[in-house]
Each structure stands twice: as C-alpha cells, then as structure tokens.
Amino acid sequence: MSFFIDTIILITGIIIIITAILAIEARSLVYGVTSLMIMSLGIAIMFMILSASYLTIFQIAVYVGAVVSLILFTVMLFPKEEKAFKLSQEGLGLLAALSFLSILLVSIISASSYLHQSPYINIDIQQWGREVAKNIIDQYGMSILALSLLLSAALIGALAIGKADTVKVKGKT
Amino acid sequence: MINLTYYLLISAILFTIGIYGLISKRSFIRLLISIEIIFNAANLNLVAFNTYNISSGLGGHIFAMFAIAIAAAEAAVGLALSVTIFRSNGTIDVTKLRKLRG
C-alpha cells in the first residue's frame, strides 16, 4: 500500500513540474492556462495525500473552478501572442532561476537531517473538519473577516478598473 | 519512502519555475500564471510542513486556505488590469507599457 501511494506521489510530482514548465513555455496561452489547470489539480492531489481533504476541495473549487477558468476566459479575449523572443532576457531568467534553485536545493538537503520526517499521518476527515472549523472560529475569526473584506474590495476594485474604461469609451462616442 | 524533503523539493522547483517565468516572460498573462505557480509552491510548502508537524496545530492548512483566497483576489484584479491595459494600449506586453515612465 505504501509503495502504491509513493508511486502516485512520484508520478503526481513529475506531472506537476512538467505542466508548470508547459504553463510558462507553451506557445499558445490557452494551452498554457490548461497546463496551469492540470498543475493545480496535481497540487490538489498532493493536498489529499497530505491529509488536507478540505483544502483539496477548496483548491479544486477556487483555483481550478474559479481562478483558472477566469484566466482562460480572459485569455480568449486577447489576440494571438506575438512571438517576440529576447534571448538575453530568457538566458538571464534561466541563470537567475538556476542559481536560485541551487541555493534552495543546498538549503533543503542540508536541513533534511533536522526536519521531522515522520510517515504519513492519516487524520479522520470528520475530525479534521471539526478541527479546522474550531480553529477558524476560535483563533482566526478576525482574519477570516479581514479576508472577506479583502475579497470584496478586490472584486469592487476589479469592477471599477473595468468600468472606468467603459465610461471613458462611452464619453468619447 | 517519500518524506518531507520530497515535497520541499517539488515546492522549490515550482517556485524556481515561477521565478523564471517572472523574469523572462513579457506577456502580462504569463506573469500572472507565474505568480499563480509561486502561490501554489508556497501552499504546498505550508501544507507539507504542517502535516509533518501536526503537533503544532493546523495553522499551516488554514494559512494555505487564506493564500488560495488571496490568490483569487489577486487574479481578479490582475485580469481586470490586463483587459484595461489591452484596451488602452492594444498589447499586454509589459515592456511596451511606457506611459507612466514619464
């Protein structure tokens, strides 16, 4: 059973990395966003394996269902992307990313002996749900309130940004 | 056997891919996609650390939930900005946006 789960995790990890690269490098933006959607689903599977079932549902509903769909519909409004490669910029990005990755890898590998590497923790889903609800109400009540205000402000801001231009265009015509 | 280090490695690689996209790409939407990848890497890190240190409570899981909600807000505003930029400039290439540079 453990071997089966390990295989799933390994394959999911590889899929996540490949789709993340495709999301950045795909020629068509639509394919890029589709890759991002698959990557988000992979992350949701990782959450499920990490015993965060509630977060899996949240990830699929909010990320895959809302955010990625929103990006996909917005992308369809734009014409085809210009193929303007700046090799120096790509090289600089690759160099910066690789140096950053090497620093991260060295830190992770050197810290791995100090990390708590316990086996999978299987939490009962109902118990986890109760625990999350209790935590949210007891400790993070104000944060949830602030978050809801932030989301409302973001939505109103997004509407205002879109609306301002519409009024300007109407005024002109 | 898979352990915490594996998740940290996946997260680090995702984060690096996001950084690469932010530096090398010029399309506004590609930059947004890169930011979303970085958000996902951070969320995976938070959840992995929390699950492997369950005695510290469920703070990591709840923080990841907050991060997902904030990413949704960021995506909404970013996409509205991209549509507005495209309407006014006819392009979403960030290197061609020079109006505010003076």
Image (cartoon, grey):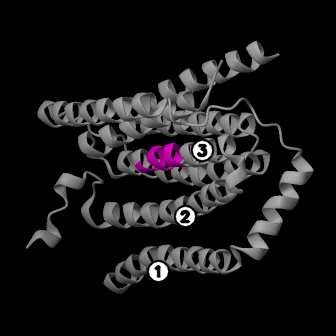
User: x, y (%) of residue A127?
Assistant: 89, 53
Q: Residues within 10 Å of mark 3 (few under 14, many from 20)?
A: many
Q: Which element carries disc 3, helix, strand or loop?
A: helix
Q: Which element carries disc 2, helix, strand or loop?
A: helix
Residue type, numbered disc 1 = Ala
Q: Which residue is mark 1?
A: A160
Is residue A76 among the parts visible in the rendering? no
Q: Quadrant of residue A162?
A: bottom left
Asked whether A116 or A81 is in front, the reply is A116
B55 above or below A81? Answer: below
Q: Which element carries disc 1, helix, strand or loop?
A: helix
Mark 2 and mark 3, same subunit?
Answer: yes
Task: State which quarter of the image contains the C terminus of chain A.
Answer: bottom left
| Residue at mark 1 to residue at mark 2: CA–CA distance | 19 Å
List the single residue furthest toward the right: A126
Does residue A171 belong to the magenta stretch? no
Q: Is residue B1 left or right of residue A97?
A: right
Number of the label disc, if any, that sits on residue B49: 3
* Earlier sequence position, callout 2 versus callout 3: 3
The reply to whether the C-beta atoms of the residues labelled 2 and 3 are less than 8 Å apart is no
Mark 1 and mark 2, same subunit?
Answer: no
A150 above or below A78? Answer: below
Which span is picked out in magenta? B35-42
The reply to whether the C-beta atoms of the residues labelled 1 and 2 are less than 8 Å apart is no
| Residue at mark 1 to residue at mark 3: CA–CA distance | 39 Å
